[in-house]
């Protein structure tokens, strides 16, 4: 077991700025959770520094590259070093749609990059496009092969926009009328995973005849692509991440892993460590050090 730590978050000043996290307008908060923009143009990073670590997640993503490119790494995050970078696969298209990920993953950028990743709630993507999210689990697909024509026109508009603010505006203007037509009658206001999962279970219970546990779980899996149990695991993991981040930013706080585990619904500290490793590829201690000191953990820093 890891020991309680007295360390607080003090990021290495040599780290490149993590990027920009764009929040959706209020009317779209149940449609997509955020847009992550990464711009390393001008950076002189090593191959290892151009690795990007991401956790397992119930969300779907739609990605653009305005400059540069990314490649998928075959090796798990913990071994994504210089040797592992040799085992990579190209992205399947100009714009890439990614489904829920049941395992952590890593990508690699051969050089400087300017990219945007929009994180959609899976039930919203299903409602907006008719796509079966279960068909996208653990997959990267060419967006031009699966999205409707009007979505591809929007992708082109975002690609050609002159700056990130106008890209976000084009995206939101496209989504707004479509989401208003298909959104749930009472969309969830908060967008942490645990809030969304609870709301999804409630929707499943009242949306159609038949309220047996099996029928409810079938509806949830149709909307989200993942079983309810797995969604709850991810929700609990995110709560632990935010609890740790909140404590670590307080200079007088100690990171008591056992207490964090209890406060966020784990049976004990070992349970939290096992789950964190499964969701991120790292122990809580290694994850914390990576966020503080390594360029490749920029997405976690941005999410904080």
Image (cartoon, rainbow, N blue to C red):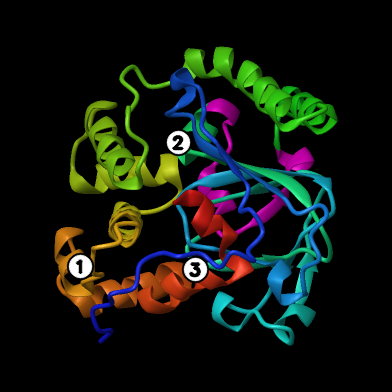
Give the percent coordinates (x, y) of residue 32. Answer: 51, 33
Residue 123 is marked as: 2
Label annotation for residue 113:
none
Relative to 245, does residue 151 appear above or below in the rendering? above
Q: Earlier in the sequence, mark 2 or mark 1?
A: 2
**Residue at image location 15% in from the left, 70% down from the top:** 267
Marks 1 and 3 close (CB-CB < 8 Å): no
Q: Secondary structure at mark 3?
A: helix
- Please identify the quarter of the rendering in which residue 260 is found: bottom left
Name the residue rendered at 61%, 53% in the picture: 18
103 left or right of 116 in image: left
Residue 120 or residue 65, whichever sits in front: 65
The local crowd at label 2, few if under 14, some if 14 to 19, many if 20 or more residues have their Cα within 10 Å, is many
Image: magenta residue range: 128-146
Q: Is residue 27 left or right of residue 65?
A: left
Q: Toward the viewer: 122 or 244?
A: 244
Of badges 3 and 2, the one in the foreground is 3
Chain-order first, disc 1 or disc 3: 1
Give the SS element for disc 2.
Answer: helix
Residue labelled with disc 3: 292
**Residue 134 highlighted magenta (yes or no):** yes
Q: Please, what secondary structure does the residue beneath circle 1 have? A: helix
């Amino acid at each position: 077991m890891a020991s309680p730590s007295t360390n607080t978050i003090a990021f290495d000043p040599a780290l490149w700025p993590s990027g920009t996290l764009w929040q959706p307008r209020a009317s779209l908060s149940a449609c997509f959770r955020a847009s992550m923009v990464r711009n390393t143009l001008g950076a002189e990073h090593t191959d290892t520094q151009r690795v990007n670590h991401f956790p397992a997640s119930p969300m779907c993503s739609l990605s653009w590259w305005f400059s540069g490119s990314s490649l998928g790494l075959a090796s798990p995050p913990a071994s994504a070093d210089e040797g592992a970078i040799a085992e990579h696969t190209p992205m399947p298209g100009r714009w890439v749609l990614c489904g829920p990920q049941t395992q952590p993953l890593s990508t690699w950028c051969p050089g400087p990059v300017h990219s945007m990743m929009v994180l959609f709630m899976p039930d919203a993507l299903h409602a907006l496009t008719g796509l079966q999210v279960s068909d996208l689990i653990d997959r990267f697909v060419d967006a031009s092969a699966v999205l409707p024509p009007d979505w591809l026109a929007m992708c082109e508009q975002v690609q050609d926009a002159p700056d990130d603010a106008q890209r976000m505006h084009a995206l939101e203007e496209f989504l707004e009328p479509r989401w208003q037509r298909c959104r749930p009658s009472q969309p969830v206001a908060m967008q942490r995973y645990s809030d969304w999962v609870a709301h999804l279970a409630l929707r499943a219970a009242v949306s159609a005849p038949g309220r047996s546990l099996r029928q409810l779980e079938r509806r949830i899996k149709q909307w989200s692509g993942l079983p309810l149990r797995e969604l709850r695991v991810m929700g609990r993991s995110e709560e632990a991440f935010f609890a740790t981040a909140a404590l670590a930013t307080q200079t007088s706080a100690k990171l008591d892993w056992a207490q964090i585990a209890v406060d966020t619904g784990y049976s004990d500290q070992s349970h939290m460590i096992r789950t964190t490793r499964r969701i991120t590829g790292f122990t809580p201690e290694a994850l914390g050090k990576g966020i503080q000191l390594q360029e490749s953990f920029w997405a976690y820093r941005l999410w904080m």
